[in-house]
Image (tube, rainbow, N blue to C red):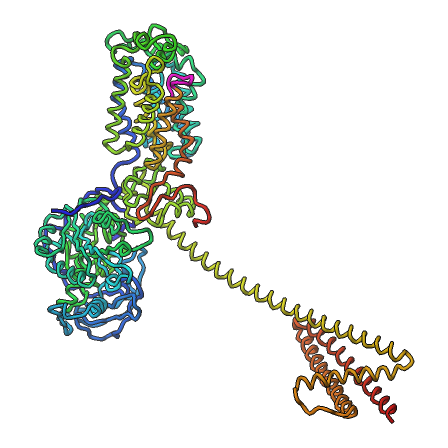
Amino acid sequence: MNSQLWDFSGGIHPAENKVLSTRRPIESSTLPERLILPLQQHIGAPAEPCVAVGDRVLKGQTIATVSGTLGVPVHAPTSGTIEAVSMHPVPHPSGMSDQCIILIPDGKEEWIQRTPVEDFHTLDRETVLQRIRDYGIAGLGGAGFPTNIKLRPPKDRKVSTLILNGAECEPYITADDMTMRERSDEIASGLRLMAWILRPERCVIAVEDNKPEAITALRKATSGTQTEVVVIPTKYPSGGEKQLIQILTGMEVPSGGIPADIGVMCQNIGTAIAVSRAIHRGEPLISRVTTITGQAVSEPGTFDVLLGTPISHLLKQAGLNEQAVDRLILGGPMMGYTLETPDVPVVKTTNCVIASTAQELPAPPPEQPCIRCGMCAEACPMELLPQQLFWYSKAGEYEKAEHLNLFDCIECGACSYVCPSSIPLVQYYRAAKGEIRVQQAEHLKADRARERFEARQARLEREQQEKEQRRKDRAKAAAEAQARKQAEAEKAESEDGPTNDRAAKAALVQEALARKKAKTESAGSAGPAKETPAEQEKPDLEALEKQLSQATAKLNTMQSMLNDAKAENADNVEKLERAVAKNHDRVKRAETALADARSVLADTQTTDS
Amino acid sequence: MALAQQSSPHARRARSTSNVMLWVILASLPGLLAQTIFFGWGNLINVIWCVVLAVGTEAAMLKLRKRPVMFFIRDNTAAVTGLLLGLSLPPLAPFWVSAIAVIAAIVLAKQLYGGLGSNPFNPAMVGYALVLISFPVAMTTNWAEPAILWQGAPSLADTLATMASGKQSAVDAFTMATPLDQYKHSISSKTAAEVLTHPTFGDGVARGWEWVNAGFLAGGLLLLAMRIITWHIPVSFLAGLAIMSLAFGSNPDLYAPLSMHLLAGGTMLGAFFIATDPVSAATSHQGKLIYGAGIGVLIYLIRTWGSYPDAVAFGVLLMNFAVPFIDHYTPPRTYGHHKARRGIPTKSQG
């Protein structure tokens, strides 16, 4: 009995080559001289070492921790001594080196205190999720996404279908196949745990129909439960998350979204076992099952490997023929990448190493022109137009490539596989994606710089305008004052006649003083009022004197500043010169005012007497 | 241990362009066999002559363009262009007419556009259309009279002599108008029954032609089965032609009947071998359907109301013009998207 299945578009049927590594049961790899444990074996922040060089560590002991939310710790795969924390080549398409903890095993396999949990129902979900994180579990399928985070989908996304991905559609790889054959009970128990956390309506283990032994074992392990073991047709890339979801549910993961958006979650077979061991055995993730295969090894097989074991060590165990090997592929022949050195370690995501001969996977023939045959589009599981993407990627017309959904490409390699012109299509897409990302980053940087610049310009302009406004206001006030003065002078003239000049001036000053007084009074509110005119005039004279001295002082300061500026040839000389001139005027005005006031005062006094 | 560095995928299917072209050549053999049996040595001689000339011209052009000669010759595409011309030209066409067609196809339509993969028009059909327009007499009067190869057909020597003589028209005794031509020109004054008494029609649909079309259909089905071509273009091509015939020409006393359209001209060769030339065809499934249907419709229009008896070349070339446009508006809907993104990107879509 099988539930309803859907087909996905495209797909290919490459030679499987799986028999090479399924003839023998899973074999434990021998203990290497050194274990190399990269601090980053997962998506997220790298872990930070919490042990010192020379420390003795026990099997399962945490040797690196993660402080942020995205990331998982690293554990010692066996007991031994920390030899170093240093840069070492790690499995990465670029062949780069990264920080690794180097551990020298002592061969005693001395465990830390383990705390197995018989019945996980006694724990709460948070505790289980925390343990999944603390025990270093990140997806063993390839990306290495921290499992505890994946098992905690966004609150508004209910996972109704939990899929355990046992498709293993890539040729050569048999790690999941062998695991399913031999460890189906643990898989079932891990799935139960995850199902308990997520409470889905449906639990599915999907296996391609080329793994009959695995299917039988899983059916046995899940008999009597609601878990469905669904057999799907063998077609690459049925194990791609998006394709598997389509096969099993008929739904498509929205572009740019995650499976939880449509209520689905996929987990890897190895991850299920790691979860089960973390809870039921109290063991952190310190080993995984990895296929070592290819025609350049005499005894290909599937190995249970301690994390950190150098691939060179495994290859030796599998009988590598150093003369015959042409390339070392980490992963499968469709999506794996070639290694520059076999010294890199097995990490949490290492599922397969292929040591191939030149006859087995020959170098591609030279690229020929695209004849638009469309076989790539027939093979594309994402329903893209690979040939158009190729032209646009090659021509650097990235906008058009993006328009044709370049970023939906899962880089499965089906298009390159079928291309009769031997065009490395995926390579073009990767290059174009990289280029677009760089451009976007630069664009973002340029945008930010522009925003900053524009903000600064706007601020300067605003300041300039405010300054201008102030200047205008002052000019207006001055003009008004001037006009008033003139009007008053005219008035006084018309009243008193031009003959009584002094008296008129005196009257003017009186008036001005009265105004000023009124102003100070009103400003100082109920101050002691009623002063005699004589009393009024006297302090006023003082005020004028004070004003003059202040203005003179200021002028002096300005003058000295100007001199300094001139000496230093500073760029504010001009400004200072203007300021000095202004102050000079001010001093002159104050002097005139004072002189006027004095003469007026003298006059009034004489008139009074 | 020197390890090879290679970008994924590491495995590839062993079907090269040259392999694909070889299969196209092999798949055309049933049709060529039928042509030879029913119309004499002419087509076979034409095919050999055109293929040799096409490959030679291609090599010369590659040399002129300073391109690796053997690298491109080995892709077999020039041979296919020569083959298609040899199969479609009149069996007794003078040697220089075929030569002009082949040279125009390879030089003008293919190499001057940048060689393999860069030509917007089907090279063979450019060559064919050129000679059809330039030498209408040579292209209409050299269709061999249907006869069984070993019963009354001109001998190999006679055929060679005729083609090599260089005369525009071959000896009348050897030739006969094509069934489509005959029908078109006599139906205006006769009834269908009267028209069909002409020896060119024979007992079935059209003597010899029905077998030739059956041969190309068989070869086409082989290409389909091998997934070298997809069904979209041949099916929409034939459907377009059939629907037009049924809709507008169902009266055999006025127009050639559907059976004549499907089996009496270059229809099957066109549908499975010519229109499916990937370089100049539309690319998406939907695009291929439009492209094929367009050719079928145009062929009917030109055959029925145009001045040429057959129209595969014109139908294909006219739709070649439309391909960039079709391609822009027929991308498939990508997985995870609500709808296809048609047209060319605008700034707002980023």
Residue A287 can be seen in this image: no
Residue located farthest toward the bottom when viewing the structure as drawn: A609
x and y percentages locating residue A504 in the rendered image: 85, 82
Residue A219 can be seen in this image: yes
Q: Taking A467 as reference, is A16 left or right?
A: left
Residue B309 highlighted magenta (yes or no): yes
Q: Quadrant of residue B239?
A: top left
Residue A338 highlighted magenta (yes or no): no
Q: Is residue B138 above or below residue A570?
A: above
Residue located farthest toward the top when viewing the structure as drawn: B173
Give the magenta part as a residue range: B303-311
Q: Which quadrant would the C terminus of chain A be assigned to in this image?
A: bottom right
User: What type of secondary structure mainly makes up the magenta span?
Assistant: loop
Q: Quadrant of residue A304?
A: bottom left
Q: Is residue A451 above or below residue B7?
A: below
The residue at 17%/72% (across/down) is A58
x and y percentages locating residue A141 in the rendered image: 22, 56
Residues A149 and A601: in front is A601
x and y percentages locating residue A130 in the rendered image: 22, 69
Residues B49 and A8: in front is A8
x and y percentages locating residue A342 in the rendered image: 24, 57
Residues B167 and A176: in front is A176
Q: Quadrant of residue B86?
A: top left
